[in-house]
Amino acid sequence: MQLIINDTPQQFAQGLTVSELLEALKQPALGVAVAVNAQVVSKSQWSQTRLQDADRITLFKVVAGG
Amino acid sequence: MLNDQDFMRYSRHLMLEDIEEAGQQRLKQAKVLIIGLGGLGSVAAHYLAGAGVGKLLLADGDKVDVTNLHRQPLFDSFSIGYNKAEQAKRRLACINPHIDIEAFEQNLDASNLAVQISHCQLVLDCTDNMASRQAINAACYQAGVPLLVGAAIRFEGQFLALEPAQSHGCYRCLYHPEQSPPMNCANSGVVGPVVGIVGLMQALEAIKYLTGAGNVPFGQLKLFDAKVHQWQSLGLNKDPHCPVCGDQPCN
């Protein structure tokens, strides 16, 4: 299936979860957050959230400074 | 009631039909807590004092350092080594002597956080670390007080407005405490105007909330990428298992 990762289309296996996607993209374990179709997915939901063809994924950084 | 001085000082607000006299009066009666007087807080506090927020509570246990001066315009070389909340109070009292400003020269812990928040209409989270942000979020949800969260690092800014009475998610739904990398402005750097822009967003949405002008984007995470000059907006739903705002809170 095709996912749009931060505006760039990429091919992935069918039925991938958010956790599996982050692993496939070799994202660091800390400091990354995810939205699917412009809705934030809480970390506790990553392993249960299955992605679908044409989903738009936003990867963004956890920012706590100020 | 607004007096003659107020009519002069706030005339540029009063001529706006979304604020007018009633909105300015609401600002005068408002009590706002600003936690953190660094790059976010010193900018937000400057504008809220200027706007005539009647009572400002400022909390910060840190002292001004020379490395703060590129982005914290309430301070100058003579402030170095002095407490930020106290220095901010002195400066803000010069900008607007007609408001009441209280400075807490300490980082608020869980117990005094709850007490101070319960007295306020609105809280601005202008801190620089995940633990404080989680504690402020939990205390605001406990007290039912709206919260405007700002954050910035490098060329990136984030803004999130939260209204506990609404059904959107909270800061704990956005980030788990352990999700944060050990990065802050001190070890990763920040471009001064980026943190200033986010602090200004906090001040702007505070003025809108308090006066009733326009709509505050509650429950939407705003991401600012300064390198490409783009804002992105993401929805934030409640995490059903959230210990702060979920169906069975256990904080």
Image: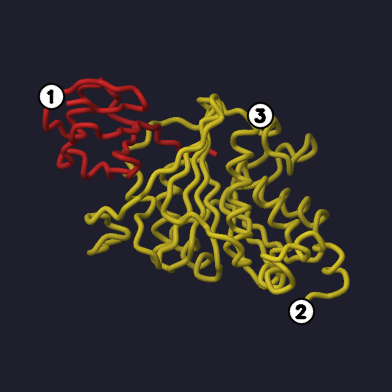
Q: Nearer the viewer, residue B5 or B142?
A: B5
Query: Looking at the image, which is closer to me, B43 or A56?
Result: A56
Q: Position of residue B178 (x, y in %)?
A: 31, 39
Q: Residue A63: which numbered mark, if any? A: none
- Residue A37 image point, x, y percent: 31, 40
Q: Callout 3: helix, strand or loop? A: helix
Question: Which residue is located at x 60 percent, y 60 percent?
Answer: B208
Q: Amino acid at mark 3?
A: Thr
Q: Residue tagged by mark 2?
A: B1
Q: Are marks 2 and 3 on the same chain?
A: yes
- Location of residue A44 (image quadrant): top left
Task: Please state which amino acid type lies under the numbered disc 2.
Answer: Met
Quarter occupied by residue B63 = top right
| Subunit that carries the residue with mark 1 | A
- Rendered shade, chain A: red
Which colour is chain B painted?
A: yellow
Q: Quickly name the residue at label 3.
A: B67
